Amino acid sequence: MTYDNLTALCIFALVTSITPGPNNLMLMASGANYGYARSVPHMAGIIAGFAVLLLLVGFGLFEIFETVPATYLVLKVFGVAYLLYLAWKIATAAAPDSMNEEVGKPFTFLQAALFQWVNPKVWTVCLTAIVVYAPSRSLGAILVLLLVFAMVTLPSISIWTLMGQQVRSSLTSTLRLRIFNGTMAVLLVASLYPMLAPA
């Protein structure tokens, strides 16, 4: 990979990992509801799940979408349905009676890793990265993708989680927490539009 291509890849990885999307919006909600430390498994699961998905797309899953395009549509439909469910869970995460009463739990490492398989944005990023920056689908090219995304994604998602934690100090009542969670749920649903809108 040339220097120019590597630079372009770094920019692509930064833009796709730091812009609003299902992962970042869910991490912001997690930071607000549970704090940064308790959201670390969620963040680690995102990185690991993305890495595994990128490897599998690069070494074989890509051919499935090329051979049977309908499989990508099925994946999108399932992903959207699951994201709508998660949006509802976020919107109803506020404690009904007391801010001291914990309702729900943050995503575990495994849940976050598996979520990448139904996240339309992650699939779009993986497919684009392979086509544009690793068209040969060689081991070396895919490992470069993994390294770049790993280095860029961690600070990007950490920023969103920390923003959520900072907001937490302002959520001093059940009403405020409900409003915040409701807003994050609406934004999560809205984040699907760029991925699902017709070209």
Image: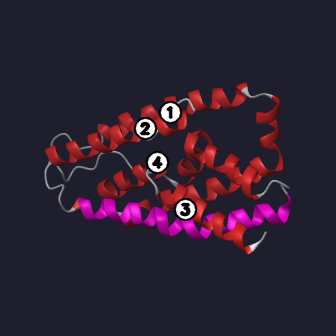
Q: Nearer the viewer, mark 4 or mark 3?
A: 4
What is the number of the mark on residue 82?
A: 1
Mark 2 burial class by Cα count in 10 Å: few <14, some 14-19, many 20+: some
Q: Which residues are magenta?
A: 138-167
For the image, the number of numbered tags is 4
**C-alpha span from label 2 to label 4:** 13 Å
Pointer 4 or 3: first along the chain? 4
Q: Position of residue 21 (x, y in %)?
A: 46, 48
Q: Nearer the viewer, mark 2 or mark 4?
A: 4
Residue at the (19%, 53%) spot, across then down: 100
Q: Position of residue 56 (x, y in %)?
A: 76, 49
Numbered disc 2: secondary structure = helix
Residue highlighted by disc 4: 21
Task: Say if the magenta span includes residue 67.
Answer: no
Q: Position of residue 93 (x, y in %)?
A: 30, 42
What is the number of the mark on residue 44?
A: 3
Task: Say if the magenta span includes residue 145.
Answer: yes
